[in-house]
Image (cartoon, grey):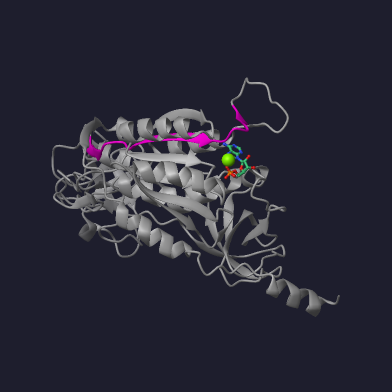
Amino acid sequence: MNDQEIQAQSSCADEYDASSLSVPEALIRINREVLPLDGHELVAVRASLGRVTAEDVVSPLDVPAHTNSAMDGYACRGEDLPLEGAKTFRLVGASFAGAPFSGSVGADECVRIMTGGVMPAGADTVVMQERVEVEGAHIRFGSGNETGQNVRSAGEDILKGAKVLDKGKWISPAELGLLASLGFGEVKVYRRPRIAFFSTGDELKSIGEALRPGDIYDSNRYTLYGMLTRIGADIVDMGVVPDRRENLQDAFRQASKVADAVITSGGVSVGEADFVKETLSSLGRVNFWKIAMKPGRPLAFGRLGEALFFGLPGNPVSVMVTFYEFVQPALRRLMGMTEVDAMMLRVPCSTRLRKKPGRVEYQRGVLFRGEKGELCVRSTGAQGSGILSSVSQANCFIVLPQDSRGAEAGTVVDVQPFQGLV
Ligand code: AMP
Ligand code: MG
């Protein structure tokens, strides 16, 4: 076969499936079901790290509170500074951070001032110390200075009464500092979502158990534990549940009683799905979807009682991809966050990517800097949905659209960086 024949053949063997749901359609259906939790709590500022603000945060003060110096130097009146040549000023005091000068600065007078020191009354300009000559209490300023230079105005960062954080903001270290700078001791945040999860499969063994032929260790509970912990959920690990009707029913029932959302892995592929479907439909409203994506085609979503339910596929990479694309935005919404979309970049890919049209693919990639310092991405190699090491090597997903037939080296592709979650 020549190249064209190979191409013709592979385009026949595409993966279009009319009964599949597209990723955006699935996201819309999920989003419709998810509302922010209704519980709030007041927590100490440090304890709010990774939580979500449950109300707008308004500044009780100006930041900075006082007009102050941005440099170590001398504060004076800008109008007294020489336009050319040099001029001597009289040193009348000092203003250090935390120890302001109590007098005021008059004509041809100056005050020693350090970074953060409160600007003395009368002064509006700071000349940096590197640009003066000091002779005892006589300070010589040259030309080339401008009125108002090196001064930070009160309220220049934040004005009293201004909104500093919107309701629904994820609190990161920058927000902790911001809250502390405003003197807040506590913050009102959404309560943490409680997530119960378990693995299904007779072949699954927990660490410490002996493997019989055909058995494998349960890894999904570990990746899920990691992602749920990083997202800030309160987790309930329910272990491995065998593929037996009574066990599954018990587990689903127990999970939906204690949790805001239930996440399972395995048991949603064709054949197995019938069995799980029957169990779930007797307990709640759950839809089984085929999604036009790879990996991660089968997905179950719905409600068990009040709890949201996500039935993720069993393959280890599929679990991580479907969590990233569907569970993550849903949980963030549940947690009260208003911005839930994953960051997307457009980056040239240095390797050739193979793909058949029909499904969106989330290939594992590595973002790196090319020879000229430019951002590039490359594939991690083999892309099987059981190859968990591909996720470990990756720092991003390369997202190839449904109709794409792959990408030649050098083409620009869409990339979702993991951003610390995966
Ligand atoms: P299933 O969707 O249950 O048919 O599982 C699909 C594939 O994923 C099978 O090869 C399973 O052995 C594997 N798998 C299912 N659950 C897990 C798990 N918790 N950890 C690792 N592999 C799993
Ligand atoms: Mg299974």
Q: In the image, residue 237 lies at what x, y percent?
A: 45, 29
Q: Depth check: give the residue in front, 116 or 317.
A: 317
The residue range painted magenta reads 187-205
Residue 197 among magenta residues? yes
Question: Is residue 411 in view from this perspective?
Answer: yes
Q: Is 235 left or right of 389, judged from the image as shown?
A: left
Q: Is 100 left or right of 281, judged from the image as shown?
A: left
Q: Main secondary structure of the magenta part?
A: strand
Q: Depth check: give the residue in front, 391 or 241.
A: 241
Residue 83 among magenta residues? no
Q: State ligand 2's quadrant.
A: top right
The part of the image, by quadrant, that contains residue 24 is: bottom left
Q: Depth check: give the residue in front, 139 or 316.
A: 316
The part of the image, by quadrant, that contains residue 17 is: bottom right
Q: Depth check: give the residue in front, 393 or 308.
A: 308
Q: In the image, residue 183 lies at what x, y percent?
A: 21, 36
Q: In the image, residue 274 lies at what x, y percent?
A: 50, 48
